[in-house]
Image: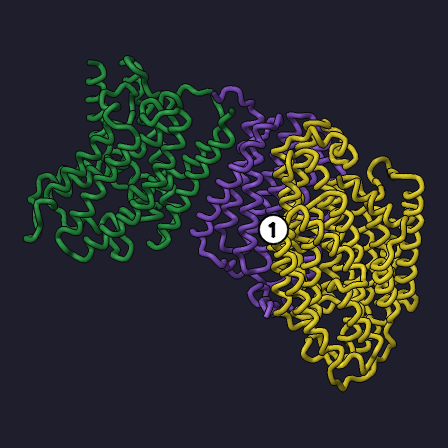
């Protein structure tokens, strides 16, 4: 099942590169994504019932922690591909994209899925780095898809900043290997995470501390942690909306997952709460910075990109606190954020297509032109702002209460940031949904289903988390230590 | 005092020192073509030092690494960059945001920081070339400095690649190289990255009529 | 006693050889530039001629102007006495280590710059200011070079440094290579050589050293010219002693000291030829690029020091 999971996006990506202009190509994109999701679901069943497993020797390792990410990634990947079908046809009808660009989009989309799945499932910290770098390269092409000056600028910034970040991560990986080699010898398994976990107590603390700093800063660049978050709003705002959705919903998660893997090793090697404190610091800084930048945004996708940064900061903070409850809340929040934020981007995508602009001042009265999109955006916004009964509320509540209990000094900072974010976003979304407008219909009917599927899941998880999911989160949280 | 250093270690130290020197030379270089040549030369020295490590430690995969470095970093990448520069007609001077002597002083400060960071770690290492870890870190930082002080696209990319050189030096010096799979993956990524950037350069030039990144300052938060 | 005799011999040799070295460099330069060369002993003829001429002083020249040539000459002679050119067995060596040596050069520079400004001509003060600019940048670089070598031998005494370096195993010191290049840069700048200054020109826009001594004549000029030769000789010997110390005699070894003379001649000959080559293949740079040139020297010297700290010291 695992082989199929990786093979589907790789093969369909290659196929779409060659034959991406055929009429069946958009369907292939969707079919491949659905297939990937089904494969991931089956794999999840397998892992849940039979426990962790290896693949390709020991090169790949799937346990309850990463299978959760795999399922989430495949799911959002699937809904995004469904959403992107009509969206991209509208873009083409507006003359913003040519057919070769669409081909590039589809093939890169599948390859991007492939690199993320590899990054999630690999057991080798080196391959993890390679996959992250490859994910950067594919998304650089996706961000610059429109070839406008602004999108090129965004893609360039993205490439350079993430290139720098990823280089730091490579240095961290080298240091990690350096520390591991002293314990595990020069054999090829010194970078295998499962081996590293076994000997993490023997790894040299001085080296591991330095390695973790580099890894955190490096992969943190891709998570969007301050101060290296500058690429994120640009890339989200200038790339096509489906790309914004997968960047926010998936790539940030995968990068954070990489940090979590490293944190497990660092925690074992370094006495005290070094790694956790570092993550809490970066998380708080990011949260605060993003919250205050939110109010200054005029472009709707930029604003929600900053919202992603804010939530990533919060999640990093939660994992930094550590402990079963905070880790559980972190995983829950990651799931909620992925689902909600991609739903918001779907709604935003249609809204901007209707309004013909991304400037929030020019988007008005969505509820009149298309009540479904209007309500979708409104509900998504309420969900991401942490209004009950949506699931984000549950996870944010858990993070807050945990912080109050163990790190009370952070409570005012968290509340301030969340409050500012609420005021900024809600104040801007409200007139967009309920204002006056004169927009016209779109040539292709938008795919609304993904928006509401996501929101429905978020709502459901807010009211009731199924026991198997709870068990699963607990399992993952326990693995994190 | 110094009599215990074997010849191979001396050679590696020499190579590392030359790589550091080349990193500074690149930082000081004002023209595009010599910059690329310096980068190629750095790749050559890097391949040389890897080869020395390989010969001394009899690690077969390091021979491959050395060959790969020679092919990729000393020949292929400079060649691609040369072709790019020629076909894009960019022969102008490299412009720097900070003047060169200041950059150099910042560079020295960075080297001191890097050496201080690496000092305790290199003491823990048992490889013959452990001392070069600090130099590798310094090279990475200098390349980073080059990336942020240059306004043109090509020097930024050269800086990026030089950073990769520094990382590679770190990998060979501190650990005798990463596992082969990882190294191949890294090499592939770098190559693909440069090709993508090549395509990118043309797009940037078409859109902005220049490769000056300072044209690309419109995306701001306000 | 042998020490004192040796010291005396070294000083006399410096006095005698210094103009010869200048002549040799000039000759090589002429060859390399396909000009017909001046005689090897031309500097001696010059000194001879100048010593016989009367001194013409500006009417507002102060006593400083008249004493400066003697001070400068004395400084250079002292420097030549401290630097072990033939033997490390120098009675003067404890009097001044390398740091003091840099100070001696600095003293000479201050005096000649003050004297240049003394008469109040525009060229004089221009040259003096430029000289101070070069000196202020060259001195830290020279100090860094010296620190690098001093770290290897764990002493700042020139004689000790030379003894340590001459007795080491054949080890590649990247730090010494950096220091050597930096030292070459500094020497070129300090001796008013081509990339920074041109000893053969009187073009007002570019000259540094020549601008300072325009007002001098007769025996004063002779002393200054001789001092310039001595400075070149001192720097050459310092470079040779630091980076190619083989063949310099040890303590209490008269024979070795005698044997060191031809070796020194050969080394100086090669060094002079290399200097002429550098001067031929390089163009003189604009005066405002000189800080960058010396900045590079400083950078190299610092790099040498850092590389020394990181690579070559084993805990």
Spot occupied by residue A278 in the image (x, y as percentages of width and height): 62, 45
Which chain's colour is yellow?
Answer: A
Q: Quadrant of the C terminus of chain A?
A: top right
The picture's colour for chain C is: green
- Quarter of the figure with residue A457: bottom right
Q: Residue at x 44, y 47 (%)?
A: B105
Query: Quick check: can you spot residue C276?
Result: no
- Asked if one can make out residue B181 in the rendered structure from this viewpoint, the answer is yes
Closest to the observer: B186 or B70?
A: B186
Q: Residue at x 63, y 44 (%)?
A: A277
Q: Residue furthest front?
A: A405
Considering depth in this image, is A30 or A287 the residue closer to the camera?
A287
**Neighbour class for label 1 at 10 Å: few (<14), some, many (≥20)?**
few
Rendered position, B56 above or below A433: above
In the image: residue A291, left or right of residue C302: right
Measured as percent of width and height from the top left, residue C146 is found at: 36, 33
**A173 w.r.t. C256: above or below:** below
Q: Secondary structure at mark 1?
A: helix
Q: Residue at x 91, y 44 (%)?
A: A48
Q: What color was chain B assigned in the picture?
A: purple
Q: State whether residue A251 is above or below residue C11.
A: below
Residue C96: x %, y % from top left: 25, 28
Q: Chain of mark 1?
A: A
User: Which residue is painted at 66% across and 43% down in the image?
Assistant: A276
Between C44 and A169, the one nearer to me in the picture: A169
* Residue A204 horizontal/vertical position (percent): 64, 30
Q: Please state which of residues C168 and C28 is positioned toward the viewer in this rendering.
A: C168
Left or right, B185 with respect to A424, comes to right
Read off the residue under disc 1: A409
């Amino acid at each position: 099942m695992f082989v199929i999971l990786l093979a589907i996006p790789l093969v369909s990506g290659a196929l779409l590169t060659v034959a991406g202009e055929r009429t069946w190509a958009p369907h292939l994109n969707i079919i491949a994504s659905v297939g990937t999701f089904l494969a991931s679901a089956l794999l999840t069943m397998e892992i849940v019932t039979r426990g962790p497993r290896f693949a390709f020797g020991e090169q790949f390792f799937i346990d309850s922690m990463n299978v959760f990410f795999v399922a989430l990634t495949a799911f959002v990947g699937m809904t995004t591909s469904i959403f992107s079908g009509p969206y991209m046809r509208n873009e083409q009808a507006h003359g913003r994209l040519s057919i070769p660009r669409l081909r590039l989009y589809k093939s890169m989309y599948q390859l991007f899925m492939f690199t993320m799945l590899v990054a999630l499932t690999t057991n080798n910290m080196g391959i993890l780095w390679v996959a992250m770098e490859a994910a950067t390269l594919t998304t650089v092409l996706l961000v610059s898809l429109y070839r406008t000056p602004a999108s090129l600028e965004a893609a360039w910034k993205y490439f350079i900043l993430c290139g720098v970040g990823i280089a730091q991560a490579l240095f961290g990986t080298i240091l990690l290997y350096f520390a591991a080699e002293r314990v595990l010898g020069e054999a090829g398994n010194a970078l295998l995470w499962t081996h590293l976990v076994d000997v993490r107590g023997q790894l040299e603390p001085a080296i591991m501390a330095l390695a973790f700093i580099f890894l955190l800063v490096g992969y943190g660049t891709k998570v969007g942690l301050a101060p290296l978050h500058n690429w994120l709003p640009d890339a989200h705002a200038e790339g096509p909306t489906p790309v914004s959705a997968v960047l926010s919903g998936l790539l940030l998660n995968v990068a954070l997952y990489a940090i979590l893997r490293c944190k497990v090793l660092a925690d074992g090697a370094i006495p005290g709460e070094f790694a956790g404190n570092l993550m809490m610091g970066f998380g708080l800084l990011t949260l605060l910075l993003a919250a205050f930048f939110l109010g200054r945004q005029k472009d709707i996708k930029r604003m929600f990109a900053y919202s992603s940064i804010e939530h990533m900061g919060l999640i990093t903070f939660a994992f930094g606190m550590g402990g079963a409850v905070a880790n559980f809340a972190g995983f829950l929040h990651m799931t909620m954020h992925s689902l909600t934020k991609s739903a918001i981007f779907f709604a935003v995508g249609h809204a901007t297509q209707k309004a013909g602009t991304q400037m929030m001042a020019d988007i008005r009265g969505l509820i009149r032109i298309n009540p479904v999109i209007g309500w979708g955006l409104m509900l998504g916004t309420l969900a991401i702002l942490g209004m009950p009964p949506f699931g984000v509320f549950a996870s944010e509540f858990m993070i807050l209460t945990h912080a109050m209990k163990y790190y009370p000094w952070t409570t005012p900072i968290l509340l301030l940031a969340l409050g500012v974010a609420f005021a900024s976003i809600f104040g801007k979304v409200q007139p967009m949904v309920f204002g006056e407008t004169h927009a016209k219909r779109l040539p292709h009917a938008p795919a609304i289903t993904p928006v509401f599927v996501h929101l429905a899941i978020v709502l459901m998880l807010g009211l009731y988390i199924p026991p198997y999911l709870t068990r699963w989160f607990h399992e993952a949280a326990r693995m994190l230590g | 005092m110094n009599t215990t250093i074997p010849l191979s270690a001396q050679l590696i130290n020499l190579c590392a020192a030359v790589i550091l020197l080349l990193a500074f030379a690149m930082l000081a270089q004002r023209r595009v073509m010599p910059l690329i040549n310096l980068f190629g030369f750095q790749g050559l020295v890097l391949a040389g030092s890897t080869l020395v490590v390989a010969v001394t430690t009899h690690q077969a995969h390091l021979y491959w690494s050395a060959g790969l470095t020679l092919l990729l970093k000393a020949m292929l990448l400079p060649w691609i960059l040369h072709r790019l520069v020629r076909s894009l007609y960019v022969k102008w001077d490299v412009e720097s945001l900070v003047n060169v002597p200041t950059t150099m002083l910042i560079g020295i400060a960075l080297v001191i920081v890097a050496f201080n960071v690496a000092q305790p770690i290199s003491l823990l290492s048992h490889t013959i070339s452990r001392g070069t870890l600090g130099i590798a870190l310094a090279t990475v930082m200098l390349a980073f400095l080059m990336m942020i002080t240059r306004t043109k696209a090509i020097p930024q990319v050269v800086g990026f690649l030089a950073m990769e050189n520094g990382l590679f030096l770190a990998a060979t010096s501190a650990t005798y190289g990463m596992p082969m799979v990882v190294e191949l993956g890294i090499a592939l990524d770098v190559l693909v990255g440069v090709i993508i950037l090549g395509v990118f350069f043309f797009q940037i030039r078409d859109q902005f009529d220049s490769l000056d990144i300072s044209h690309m300052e419109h995306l701001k938060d306000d | 006693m042998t020490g004192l005799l040796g010291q005396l011999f070294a000083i006399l040799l410096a006095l005698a050889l210094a103009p010869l070295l200048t002549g040799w460099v000039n000759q090589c330069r002429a060859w390399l530039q396909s000009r017909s060369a001046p005689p090897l002993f031309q500097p001696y003829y010059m000194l001879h001629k100048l010593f016989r001429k009367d001194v013409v002083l500006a009417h507002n020249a102060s006593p400083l102007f008249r004493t400066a040539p003697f001070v400068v000459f004395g400084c250079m002679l002292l420097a030549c006495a401290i630097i072990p050119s033939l033997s490390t067995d120098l009675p003067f060596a404890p009097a001044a280590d390398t740091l003091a040596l840099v100070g001696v050069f600095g003293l000479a520079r201050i005096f000649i710059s003050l004297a240049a400004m003394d008469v109040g001509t525009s060229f004089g003060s221009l040259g003096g200011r430029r000289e101070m600019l070069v000196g202020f940048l060259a001195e830290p670089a020279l100090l860094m070079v010296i620190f690098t070598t001093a770290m290897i031998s764990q002493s700042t005494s020139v004689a000790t440094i030379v003894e340590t370096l001459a007795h080491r195993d054949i080890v590649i010191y990247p730090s010494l290579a950096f220091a050597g290049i930096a030292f070459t840069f500094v020497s070129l700048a300090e001796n008013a050589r081509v990339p920074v200054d041109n000893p053969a020109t009187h073009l007002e826009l570019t000259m540094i050293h020549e601008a300072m001594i325009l007002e001098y004549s007769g025996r004063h000029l002779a002393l200054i010219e001789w001092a310039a030769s001595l400075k070149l000789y001192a720097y050459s010997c310092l470079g040779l002693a630091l980076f190619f110390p083989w063949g310099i005699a040890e303590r209490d070894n008269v024979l070795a000291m005698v044997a060191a003379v031809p070796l020194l001649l050969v080394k100086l000959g090669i060094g002079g030829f290399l200097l002429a080559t550098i001067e031929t293949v390089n163009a003189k740079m604009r005066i405002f690029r000189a800080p960058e040139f010396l900045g590079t020297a400083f950078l190299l010297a610092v790099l040498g020091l850092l590389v020394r700290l990181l690579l070559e010291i084993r805990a």
